[in-house]
Image: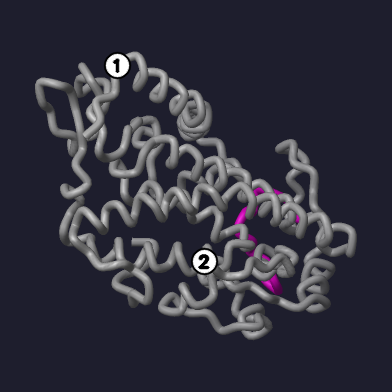
Amino acid sequence: MRIVPRDEWELERRAYLDRVRPWAEARLRRVSRQEKHPVYDFLFEYFSFRPAHLMRWSPGCGRVVADATRDDVQWAEFAASDAGLSLDAAAFPAQRHGYLKWAAAYLEAVGTREPAFGCAGLHEWAMVYREPNVRHPYVPLRLSHAETDAVVEGLPLRCSHYDAYRFFTPPAVPRNRWELTREATTDHDQAGCLHVNMDLYRFAYKIAPFCPGEVVAGAFEVARAAREIDMRASPYDLSAYGFAAVPIETAAGRAEYAELQREAYRLGRPVRERLLGVYRELLSASHGVHPRGAQLFEDPRG
């Protein structure tokens, strides 16, 4: 293990906290005031990493943070020695090795599949299609219910991500190009999908604290950026929250959305590669086989 001097890792920890603390603290303030946010609450409700956990920095595996205390690295998994605190990749829980194999295979498959940018972000529209009780009742729709339904009926539904598809209203489900299932997640997900890029954050925190803080922060930033695009292209009017709409009901709006998808893809690609490297490192430490071709061992959401 490489020994990292205190002044070096303190800079890393400070940089990490500077990236995530404003968002975690903003979430805690909203909760204390019982305020909702249709864009950013998703990052703490759909994803199960609490603000307190997000604000715990980890140097990852294979490094000794010199002269560190339990207050400096607040993860119980780290072992103490005379040199400082460290985390061995071989300490990853054996009962979760099946998940590691599935996740590495998934990340590799998504990373090598050709990204697609032609869905027009219709998944949020399919979630309110012919449904008077919308998911964010405190936010108005940009169009009338009839006009919103007409957009879904006038454009092809090409959602390839199960965790968006499963929230479609019953009338919207048969309109989708694919009938998606949890078991076929690896067969359909592709890196042009905003939700697939958001899910990089889940893959990072699900192996905390074995995932370095800089990767967790990068994945969180990808998720936040993708979520903003996602909701700007939704049927909701978010002008009161400072978000300009991407009007995918128009040809110009769909072209803008596709370019924003490409930006999210470019932002997510290096994070996905780093994550895959971390997963492979953990598999190697557990004497696992290379994950190519692995089957689904457990629910990808864990």
Amino acid at circle 1? Arg
Give the quadrant of residue 66.
Answer: top left
Give how far across and how far down residue 213 sits, in percent.
39, 35
Q: Residue at x 62, y 50 (%)?
A: 226
Residue position marked by numbered label 2 in the rendering: 110
Q: Is residue 300 above or below residue 232?
A: below
Name the side, left or right, on which 116 lies relative to 83.
right
Packing grade of label 1 (10 A; few <14, some 14-19, many >=20) is some
Q: Residue at x 31, y 70 (%)?
A: 298
- In front here: 99 or 250? 99
Packing grade of label 2 (10 A; few <14, some 14-19, many >=20) is some
Magenta stretch: residue 78 in it?
A: no
Name the side, left or right, on which 165 lies relative to 243.
left
Q: CA distance from mark 2 to mark 1?
A: 37 Å
Disc 2 secondary structure class: helix
Amino acid at circle 2? Val
Residue position marked by numbered label 1 in the rendering: 6
Magenta residues span 129-141
Disc 1 secondary structure class: helix
